[in-house]
Image (tube, rainbow, N blue to C red):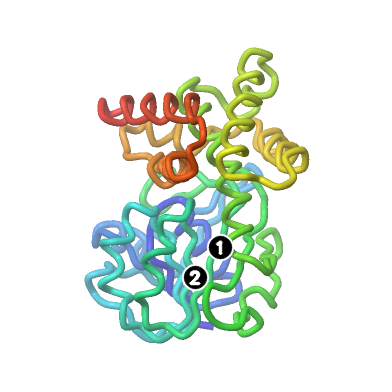
Amino acid sequence: MRIGIIGGGAIGLLFASHLSEKHRVTLYTHTEDQASIINRDGIRLIEDGESRLLTGIISKGLDEGISGEDLLIVAVKQYHLPQVLPWINGIQVPLLFLQNGFGHISYLKRLQSPAIYLGVVEHGAMKHDGNTVEHTGLGITRIASFKGELEQLSLVNGRIDHFPFKKSEDYHSMLMDKLVVNAVINPLTAILEVENGGLITNAFYYQLFQDLFEEISDILEVRNKTESFEHVKSVCMATAENRSSMLKDLENGRRTEIDAILGHVLSEAKSKGKSDCLTSSLYRMVKGKESQGG
């Protein structure tokens, strides 16, 4: 299958690396410089302490246009979607979006593709430079249909070792589960400047972890709080040595996804008249650090 991936960040590089094992992959990047480096040197994947160089991946600048793909995976962060949409508005091939939060849902109804899918990525990935990515935590990618039959997406029916895909029946529940995880772990680790596991092992941080989950789960009206809390905690422990993407963004002076994550939670709190004291405080802390370049 011919797979195009839009976005040369950690997730884009990770997906390009693994999917190239069985598919012809073209990575569409924001800059021509990154595309040139990948075409010249390949993508270096660091995994389990070993480094592999993958040279069969084609890379193009997004401004060269998109054509000849059987599936297009959009792996940019949510706040970059408005820049990407003009390139995919009229595309008729299946589209798979991998953004956090719910903000991207409003864009999807405008697209002409007859098949649109949503995914959540539970892998850990860290981009070292323009063509090097480290697979820091093994997980799965869950995929649900927004429009079109999920069975027609051959990606979820194939098998790639160490890079599994799993079908989800309801995209709203799937995104909500991921949102709760991100909303609790990312802002706390970003402000406290700790690895994920520190939220559990430090008794004071763990109390914050519990309090934030309680407030967010109330705002989002999570049905099974006990099960949801255990899921967030298990993700935290499974990625104990990881530094969250939000923490890494602040450390590198980059824009975070706080608006896509806590921004959505605060919007829900306002519409429902729910208390959001801790959530709004964390939101302002992250935005404050973000405005100062980390």
- Across and down, in percent, residue 246 comes to 45, 36
**Residue at (38, 66) in percent of width and height:** 6
SS class, disc 1: strand
In the image: residue 179, left or right of residue 76: right
Which quadrant is home to the C terminus? top left
Q: Quadrant of the N terminus?
A: bottom right
Q: Is residue 22 above or below residue 128?
A: below
Q: Amino acid at mark 1?
A: Gly
* Residue 137 spot, x, y in % from top left: 63, 45
Q: What residue is drawn where x is 46% and y is 69%?
A: 73
Q: List the residue tagged with mark 2.
A: 96
Towards the viewer: 171 or 221: 221
Q: Quadrant of residue 43?
A: bottom left
Residue toward you, 174 or 264: 264
- Say left or right for 110 vs 137: left
Residue at x 40% of width, y 74% of height: 109
Are there few (<14), some (14-19), or many (20+) residues within 10 Å of tag 2?
many
Discs 2, 1 touching: Cβ within 8 Å: yes
Task: Compare residues 57 and 176 and report the one nearer the observer.
Answer: 176
Give the distance between the C-alpha atoms of the residues marked 2 and 1, in whole angstroms: 7 Å
Question: In percent of the image, x 52 and y 78: which residue is there?
Answer: 147
Q: Secondary structure at mark 2?
A: strand
Please state which amino acid type lies under the numbered disc 2. Leu
Name the residue tied to disc 1. Answer: 119
Q: Which mark is residue 276?
A: none
